[in-house]
Amino acid sequence: MARRKLVAGNWKMNTTLLEAVALAKAVAQGAAASNAEVAVFPPFTWLAAVGEALRSSSVALGGQDVSSEQKGAFTGEVSPAMLTETGCKYALIGHSERRHILGESDATINNKLHAALDVGLHVVLCVGETRPEREKDGMKERVFERQIFAGLAGVTANQMAKVVIAYEPVWAIGTGLTATPEQAQDAHKFIRGKLSQLHGETIGAATILLYGGSVTADTAAGLFAQPDVDGGLVGGASLKADAFLKIIAAAG
Ligand code: PGA
C-alpha cells in the first residue's frame, strides 16, 4: 500500500510573530513542488497569521495541542473548533513534552483525540519510550502498546483515516541523538502491527507513521527510506527554512 509521506514541523514555544510568518512563507514557497504533504505547527498565538501566510499554498496548519473540551469555563485552553476555525487541519496530541513535563495521562490524551476527531480535525498522536524504558528488555513494546491502545481507545475504523501516529523516542527529542533507521523501523513495524491488531491489516497498512526525535537534513533520508517510516515530525530543524526544506526534499 503506497502511503504519502508527511513532513511536519513542530515549532514548539519558538519564533516571534515576524519569524513565524517569514518561516511559513519560506516553507510554502520551497515545498510547493514536493510530493510529500507538509504541515507546520506554530504556537497558538501565531496560528492565524501563519495560516494567512500559507493561504493558497499546499502546506497544512496544525495546533500543537488541543483541549479535550469543546467550550466553556476552561481558562487557557483552546478548543478543537477554535483550531478548525483558524484553518487548522491537524492537532498534535500526546507530545512527550506534554506527557512528561506537563503530566498528561493516556486518558487525557484519548479525550483530546476524540474531541479533535469529533470536529473533523486530523490528529497526530505521539508515542515513544524514555531511555530507561528502552534499556529494559521488552519494556518499550509494552509502552508502545499501552500508549497506542489507550490513546486510540474508542476510535472507529472510519476515524483512523484521520489519525497519524508519530513515534518519538523521548531520549531522542531535542537531544541530538537520533534513533538509527533500524531502531525506527523496528518500532514502526511493531506499532503498525498493533494498529492491525486493533483495526485490521488494511487500516494498519494505510496509517501514516512518522518518526520524530532530532531529525536533521543528514539523517532524514536514511530514516524515510525505511519501509514503515512515512515521514517525520521535526522540532529543532523545522525552525530554519533551509534545513526543513532539505528534510522535505528527503521525503521525495
Ligand atoms: P526535535 O523535536 O526534532 O527537536 O528532537 C521533535 C519533536 O519533539 O517533535
Image: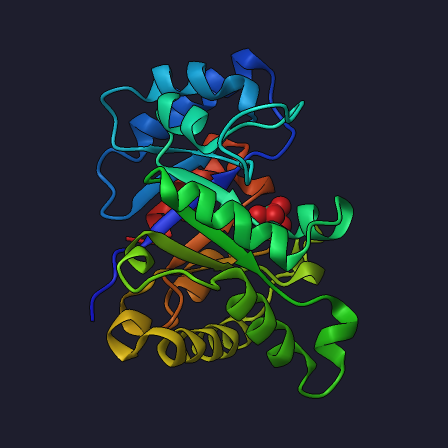
The residue drawn where x is 55% and y is 13% is 17
- In this view, the residue in front, 220 or 120, is 120
- In this view, the residue in front, 18 or 240, is 18
The residue drawn where x is 68% and y is 46% is 98
The residue drawn where x is 30% and y is 35% is 31
- In this view, the residue in front, 112 or 211, is 112
What is the basis of the colouring in this image?
rainbow
Above/below status of 150 relative to 115? below
Name the image quarter holding the N terminus. bottom left
> What is the tally of numbered marks visible in this picture?
0
The answer to whether residue 34 is left or right of residue 250 is left
Residue 240 on image: x %, y %: 52, 32
Residue 57 on image: x %, y %: 25, 26
The residue drawn where x is 36% and y is 37% is 119
The answer to whether residue 195 is left or right of residue 214 is left
Residue 196 appears in view = yes
The answer to whether residue 68 is left or right of residue 40 is right
Above/below status of 42 relative to 122? above
Residue 227 appears in view = no
Residue 6 on image: x %, y %: 35, 50
The furthest residue to the bottom: 137
Residue 34 on image: x %, y %: 25, 42
The furthest residue to the front: 72
Quarter location, residue 171: bottom right
The answer to whether residue 158 is left or right of residue 240 is left
Above/below status of 19 relative to 229? above
